[in-house]
Image: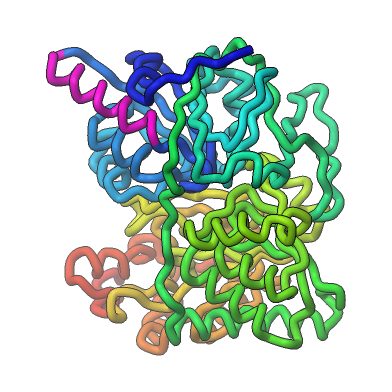
Amino acid sequence: MAFNIISAAEAATYIKHGYNVGLSGFTPAGSPKAVTPEIAKIAEAEHAAGRPFQIGIFTGASTGDSADGALIRAKALRYRAPYTTNADFRKAVNNGEVAYNDIHLSQMAQELRYGYYGKLNVAIIEACHVTPDGKIYLTAGGGITPTIARLADHIIIELNAAHRGTDCIGLHDIYEPIDPPYRREIPVYHPSDRIGLPYLQVDPKKIVGIVEVNIPDEARGFTAPDPVTDKIGQNVAEFLLSDMKRGIIPPTFLPLQSGVGNIANAVLGALGSNPDVPDFEMYTEVLQEAVVDLIRAGRVKFGSTCSLSVTNECLQGIYDDFDFFKNKLIIRPSEISNHPAVVRRLGIISMNTAIEADIYGNVNSTHIAGTKMMNGVGGSGDFTRNAFISIFSCPSVAKEGKISAIVPMVSHHDQTEHDVNILITEQGIADLRGKSPAERAKEIIENCAHPDYRELLWDYLKIASKGHTSHRINAALAMHDALLKKGDMRLVNWNDYL
């Protein structure tokens, strides 16, 4: 059938107050960019006229500023899930202006299918090509697109010429599991296994219009590595090589998962440049620019991901060399890229970053001082609990040493001590496997804490009530309290809590 070609402004009129809307993509890669700013304009006009206009948004992960940013500034959002990185949205969340639900990314699509969030009215999907019989070829991100396309009453497509049309078809592997009680195993046994289709099949009658655009992804760049991130990367490589020499990691190595950001890029760079690290595969949720470089160099043999979260120059380079990359990359939906059973089956080594960790190995991935949301838990929990080895890394201090990343008790709890195997800072490596809480505390304080904080942490243990996990409850967050009151965790005085 022939589809209506409509403007972004006309497409936005399909979104009504109170609707739930699903967006394609995962990070800014593959997210809609033209229709959402027009929805924001409608919200502003309705509010100016004294009428309500707010919607719920469901995504695979973060989006670009043209979605999360434009909508939150227009006060168009009532509800949002799961993960975001937009600064304006973060401010609104922490001011209590929007209902934000921080969900493990592997669970977002299935919870929509289970009906936890009510009806999904419209899906807005970015595509590089659409056929008359309803085959949609996606762009640089997978996310929850198969699920929102199936559940939504109506589909709006942004046909984005920035993604080269049919020139880049073939990267995606679209697969949606059957829900309980009929679900079967996800048949991924190697990172390169294809189990689905290269396109998303929908009922063409649901497509209400196609918006033709030519808008690059709102890619995020990362700062260059510095001595601290370089040292963290070297420590990760040193640890993995040590485990390989001990025979824990097989000589053929294991697939890696890596979070997003400067530390992740530094870690991957260190692994790729170390000649003792074998060529390896990635099975991850976000594939960054460092991995693309390693694929070109032959160091990464294959990359399975949910998103090509790279700069536009890097993405265009992939498209330019598509014949080279098409058999070395797969983009999957997030509930497959992050599927706990697949992570455990493949023996993934997970590498994620922490805001802070406590002396027993509990990790805070999401909240500053326990209350202020940073971005969200993302997929770190999906991988951490099910990994062959789970690694968390972070600089030992922040804000010119006024904040310690190693504290007596985390101010918000995302990953438990039961799931965190290895903690790494630029100071060193804490191997927590097989250790009691007291042994973990010694390992973390001695190897990961900054020298300015080691004695403070030992002093905390001296005043703690003894038990399987020793704590002094009224002092457990005293370093955070000192930061809030005095501006520096080093100014804590344990005598105040005796």
Q: Is residue 381 magenta?
A: no
Q: Relative to 44, is 378 on the left or the right?
A: right
> Picture coordinates of residue 185 (x, y %)?
84, 37
Which residue is drawn at the image coordinates 63% and 20% (left, top)? 150
Q: Relative to 497, is 27 on the left or the right?
A: right
Q: Is residue 46 magenta?
A: yes
> Picture coordinates of residue 452 (x, y %)?
36, 87
Q: Does residue 495 appear in the picture of this structure?
A: no
In the depicted structure, whether residue 369 falls above or below residue 65: below
491 and 16: which is toward the camera:
16
In the depicted structure, whether residue 116 falls above or below residue 429: above
| Magenta part of the chain | 34-50
318 and 453: which is toward the camera:
318
> Picture coordinates of residue 414 (x, y %)?
51, 53
208 and 453: which is toward the camera:
208
> Picture coordinates of residue 48 (x, y %)?
13, 20
Coloration mode = rainbow
Mostly what secondary structure, the magenta segment? helix
410 and 246: which is toward the camera:
246
Q: Does residue 403 appear in the picture of this structure?
A: yes
Which residue is drawn at the image coordinates 52% and 85% (left, top)? 231
